Image (cartoon, rainbow, N blue to C red):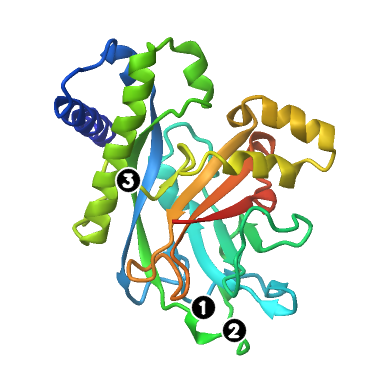
Amino acid sequence: MTTYEIQKQDFIHKITECVSRYENGWDDAEAIFSLIIPTIGFIVQKENDAAELASRFGGDPMVPDDFSWPEVYGHSMAFYFQFNMQELSPFDNDNRLPDEGLLLCFVEANSAMYEYHDPKKRHSHVYFFPNTSSLQAASVPQNLKSEFVRKASLIQFGYSFDIAEWNHPIRHSVNLSDDDVDFLEQIRDDIWSQSLLGRERRKLSEVPSNCVDRIFGNSNHPEHQASWAKLYYEDEYECNEMVAGSLDEHFVNLATIRMSYDMGSGFELRDDDVCLAISKEDLEARHFEATMVMVTAS
């Protein structure tokens, strides 16, 4: 069996194990298993001297010569993370990401960057540099408060899985009984609780099959989707039409991250859930600068 198959079997085992704790099982287990979708999970290692081009939270971002550090309200944004596509590519079974390039994310960590903010005032900036050979480390601006500056924490990727939410496109082709629909939400909660517990106890030396921090999969907070539409569509009618439909047909949950200062994936004064979303058209065009960043208090 391949590593991918082993991880998928482990995820199915976790689902089955959760079911065994309840008195009544599934009406249709095979239908439930057909809702398993692949993601790319990741865990954060302890602060270390990570290589400059490595995927990591914190440290000095790798940028071109003419790069201008992003600001909001006259304040420098905090450098959050960078993903090296060469490190993600081996786990991207559906080939949705480029094979090379560096994706960087900056956020306004000084105050909230929640979904109700004015969408025309960017509270985050995402950059994508397809050619990494000419990038160099940028020094953190001196006016950025120390609590929003992190030492580098290396990111380790691996195969992981999720269960499609009610608004995911593949749910449209699977008929579930009312009991299975209700039961499915309980099992999803159990699976992510297990993952969060292992994460908080620092037991994760390898990426688990039910990794809470992940590329693709469902958003931890589906209510973000209406906000995605509001940020993306200026026309109110078009926005309302999009919200009324299935937004997962138009948007991709690019990343879900649980901010945690102690775990290396957050800032000292923040402990929230971060969701990065991008339209399918922008993803296919590699227009990552159009990525939207949403935050919900955990």
Separation of residues labelled 1 and 2 (CA atoms): 7 Å
Percent across and percent down for residue 171 are 48, 19
Residue under circle 1? 148
Q: In front here: 134 or 202? A: 202
Residue type of the residue flagged with mark 1: Phe
Disc on the earlier residue, 3 or 2: 2
Question: Tag 2's secondary structure?
Answer: loop
Give yes or no for contact between labels 1 and 2 (Cβ–Cβ under 8 Å). yes
Q: In front here: 83 or 30? A: 30
Residue type of the residue flagged with mark 3: Cys
Percent across and percent down for residue 186 are 31, 31
The residue depicted at 79 percent of the width and 57 percent of the height is 120
Image quarter (top left, top right, bottom left or bottom right) of the N terminus:
top left
The residue depicted at 61 percent of the width and 55 percent of the height is 130
Residue under circle 2? 144
> In the rendered view, does 103 fall on the left or right side of 14?
right
Percent across and percent down for residue 234 are 83, 43
Tell me, yes or no, if residue 162 can be seen here.
Answer: yes
- Residue 211's label in the rendered image is 3
The residue depicted at 33 percent of the width and 17 percent of the height is 180
Disc on the earlier residue, 3 or 1: 1
Question: Tag 3's secondary structure?
Answer: loop
> In the rendered view, does 236 fall on the left or right side of 109?
right
Question: Tag 1's secondary structure?
Answer: helix
Q: Identify the image quadrant of residue 131.
A: bottom right
Separation of residues labelled 3 and 1 (CA atoms): 26 Å
